[in-house]
Image (cartoon, rainbow, N blue to C red):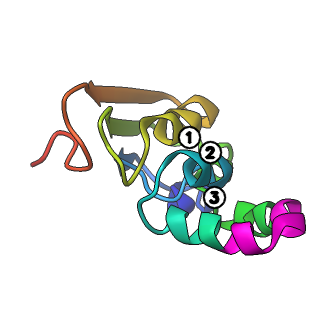
Amino acid sequence: MAVAGLRDDLRAAVADVPFLCHFRRASQITDSGPYAEIARWLSGHRFSVETAMETLSYLDGVNFAARATCPAWFSVGLMDKICPSSTVFAAYHRYAGPAEIEVFPYNGHEGGAE
């Protein structure tokens, strides 16, 4: 999504279980890395939450999705502990171009596999 959000000459983008989206949400609902690392750091830096989230926003796939205009195909596994489904849906709903999403209700991070 970073490339799709930074380039305007792409024909299409594939966001197959996109990673690093909606850091705040992910760090609050999963204990998988790297989000657990964020939560661990914030537990010791209680008054730095907003600063940390603002810094992480520069890398957040949701913000790149909001800038992307080429057609995109997303996928999500509803049982994904690495890329929680709500973070994938956050990027999908913010995507500025035409987008479709394939939902795999009983899959984890492998999504639709091959």
Q: Around disc 3, counting alpha carbons within 10 Å, would you say few (fewer than 14), some (14 to 19), or many (20 or more)?
A: many
Q: For the residue marked with disc 3, what is the amino acid?
A: Asp
Q: Nearer the viewer, mark 2 or mark 3?
A: 2
Residue at screen point 45% across, 37% down: 71
**Quadrant hosting residue 96:** top right
Q: Which mark is residue 60?
A: 3
Residue 87 point in image, percent of width and height: 53, 41
Q: Amino acid at mark 2?
A: Arg
Magenta stretch mostly in which secondary structure? helix
At horizontal 58% and vertical 29% (from top left) the residue drawn is 93
* Residue 15 on image: x %, y %: 38, 48
Q: Position of residue 105 (x, y in %)?
A: 25, 25
| Residue at x 32% of width, y 32% of height | 78
Q: Which mark is residue 25?
A: 2
The circle drawn on residue 91 is 1
Residue drawn 36% across the image and 48% down it: 81
Could you tell which of marks 3 and 1 lies nearer the N-terminus?
3
Note whether 100 is above or below 70 in the view shown. Answer: above
Q: CA distance from mark 2 to mark 3?
A: 11 Å
